[in-house]
Image (tube, rainbow, N blue to C red):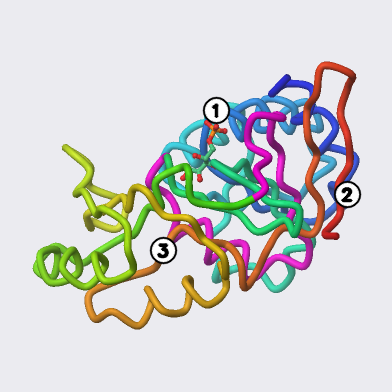
Amino acid sequence: MKQAVARAAIAHIVEGQVVGVGTGSTANFFIDELALLGQRIRGAVASSEATRRRLEGHGIRVLDLNEVDRLPVYVDGADEINPSLQMIKGGGGALTREKIVAAVAEKFVCIADQSKLVAVLGHFPLPVEVIPMAVNHVRRELARFGGEPIVRDRCTTDNGNLIIDVHGLEIADAAALESGINQIVGVVTNGLFARRPADVCLLATAAGVQTKIAG
Ligand code: 5RP
């Protein structure tokens, strides 16, 4: 299923341009498909060190985001996605770089299997990237939002920070929660992609790949 959506995402690539590439097992399938395009893309911007290594392993040129004027498309997976195409991301710990690349991209194509589609976000624990010296402060502040914040074991992000996963949230207003958590001093960013949701979701189902747009 992951390979099917990865393959379908290739149709969204703009030839001769740079593509933004996400992180995770679904994004890995996409990288493998991207490699088949050879010189038809100018290169890629990676959302994590793991993705950079996989792209380079395939001989795909990896550019720094600051070298790029235009990023027509960003392709990435999600941990949860709702019918408005708002997402929880960061299960793989790459949420901050993913959010930066997504902010630059003109189009966000989410690739996911059916199990990721939910009516209400929050069953998947919400990742929050935190500056290490602030971790206890942020944990106390996050508890005010109603969930149970747990520091992720043995996890240091590509940016040298920690992750707190907030369990047990039922997220009624994802955009408000995204902004609210980002106001806590010491938070780098959180895994809600609500203010910048996906533009298209390619969803793998037993009946084939479905294309969903926000609705
Ligand atoms: C990584 C992410 C991934 O997109 C998310 O965890 C989904 O991963 P997978 O495709 O392996 O299910 O946000 O930080």
Q: Are marks 3 and 1 in contact (CB under 8 Å)?
A: no
Q: Which residue is mark 2?
A: 15
- Magenta region includes residue 108: yes
Q: Are marks 2 and 3 in contact (CB under 8 Å)?
A: no
Q: Residue at x 51, y 60 (%)?
A: 171
Q: 212 left or right of 113? A: right
Q: 198 left or right of 97? A: right
- Magenta region includes residue 26: no
Q: Is residue 48 above or below residue 196?
A: above
Q: Is residue 189 above or below residue 156?
A: below
Q: Residue at x 43, y 41 (%)?
A: 91
Q: Residue at x 69, y 24 (%)?
A: 2
The answer as to whether callout 3 falls within 8 Å of ligand 1 is no
Q: How many marks?
A: 3
Q: Which residue is mark 1?
A: 25
Estimate how packed mark 3 is, as few (under 14), some (14 to 19) or many (20 or more) residues with alpha carbons within 10 Å.
many
Q: Which residue is mark 3?
A: 190
Q: 75 left or right of 133? A: right
Task: Give the quarter of the figure containing the C terminus.
Answer: bottom right
Element at badge 1? helix
Q: Residue at x 9, y 68 (%)?
A: 133
